[in-house]
Amino acid sequence: MQYFFIPGRLQDLSTEELKSVLKIFSKSKYSVDATNKGFILVDSDCSAETMREIFNRLGGFVKFGKILSEQEERDFLNKYLSKGRITFGVSRVGIESGPIKVKKLATEIKDYFKQNNVSARYVGGKGFAFLSSAEISGNKVLENGFEIVNLETRVGDLLTGNTVAVQDIDDFTKRDYGRPVADKKMGMLPTKLARIMLNLAELESGSTIWDPFCGSGTILTEALLMGYNALGSDIDEYAVKGAYKNIKWLSQNYNLGDTKYSVFESDVMRPNKPLQKKLRYTSVNAMIFEPYMGPPQHRVMSAYTAEELLTNVMSLYKEIFTFAERINSPNLKAVFVVPSYKTKKGWATIRYNTFLSKRWKVHNREGLHWSRSNSIIRRNILIANLKK
């Protein structure tokens, strides 16, 4: 069967996340086509229900569905003729997506139901070309009807899909802003990005991750929610207390199964004995982290300020990766953020070979990126593993 996945703003990053999750959780053969604008196609023997489970693990996608065969497309609307009232939506994704074609199809669908005495309510997206996850959820489109998605490929072919599920935006928002402790002054790592980074590590269920700059615990809480054990450390005692509060809140609102966690106050420049002891007797499978990158920035900075911030970050990297080489963790993987700062002379950043020894193999040398159009700090995400 063929499925479509609609990524968020950053298709390259989302594509790598999807490939990582398929690699671990798909038990059948599959292929991924990420060459089209705005959507990714997956050919797989997996059932729609298994694909839904895979989709629910993802942080970088807004919806997914099944590509309809010609016969399924012809018969699709007939399945809803027995219902007295339905709600439906239409989206178009691809090179020539536009509101006129969407509205034309929506009118044809509505007229078809009217001729068959079915009351049909059409939910149009803003601008009509694309119906967002929030609009689908808010109008209960999938519960009370369906969404048809037209996908235009790079060579002009038109595919028709039926949306199976959309991202639970409310749940991500709840974990971003509903938790007890969130330090906005330190800069918040988005929950979606934390999940993407964890997925990029390609870990089996029950694995253990370590975040050496855990802050208030965004990566830790997402790890626990995904079935991983979590170890966190931070130099700030208030951040550590906040991480504990957030994990407790998570356990009260979600089922964490038998996952385990520990959080320590410790400086990565001088790891204390409790943390060293814990790491000595714990097999860590991956380090997932974002270091402190300086206070939030609201305007383009000077080259001097950027260089100062990068020097501080690089000293943290050198210490943490040197220390990681000594802990009891064969095949250790690292997924981490390297910042770039927007200056009046362009973007300033550091290269991984200035802080990683030759014992580390970097898998994505060009890096993946998480940023917004007006960002002053861009997150470059690197994936590396410690060579045997």
Image (spheres, helix red, strand yellow):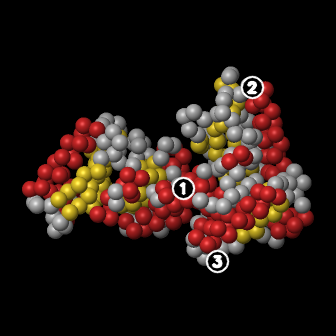
Which quadrant of the figure contains the C terminus? Answer: bottom right
Q: Residue lying farthest top?
A: 345
State the residue position of label 3. Answer: 258
State the residue position of label 1. Answer: 173
- The CA distance from mark 2 to mark 1 is 35 Å
Q: Position of residue 84 (x, y in %)?
A: 17, 66
Circle 1 — which element? helix
Residue type at mark 2 is Ala
Q: Which residue is drawn at 83% across and 54% down?
A: 235
Image quarter of residue 98: top left
In this view of the protein, can residue 348 be seen by the observer? yes
Residue type at mark 1 is Thr
- Disc marking residue 230: none
User: Which badge, 3 or 2, is on the more N-terminal residue?
Assistant: 3
In this view of the protein, can residue 385 be seen by the observer? no
Residue type at mark 3 is Asp
Q: Where is residue 305 in the image (x, y as percent from the top left)?
A: 77, 29
Circle 2 — which element? helix
Q: Residues within 10 Å of mark 1 (few under 14, many from 20)?
A: some
- Disc marking residue 303: 2
User: Which badge, 3 or 1, is on the more N-terminal residue?
Assistant: 1
User: Which badge, 2 or 1, is on the more N-terminal residue?
Assistant: 1
Name the one closer to the observer, 254 or 69: 254
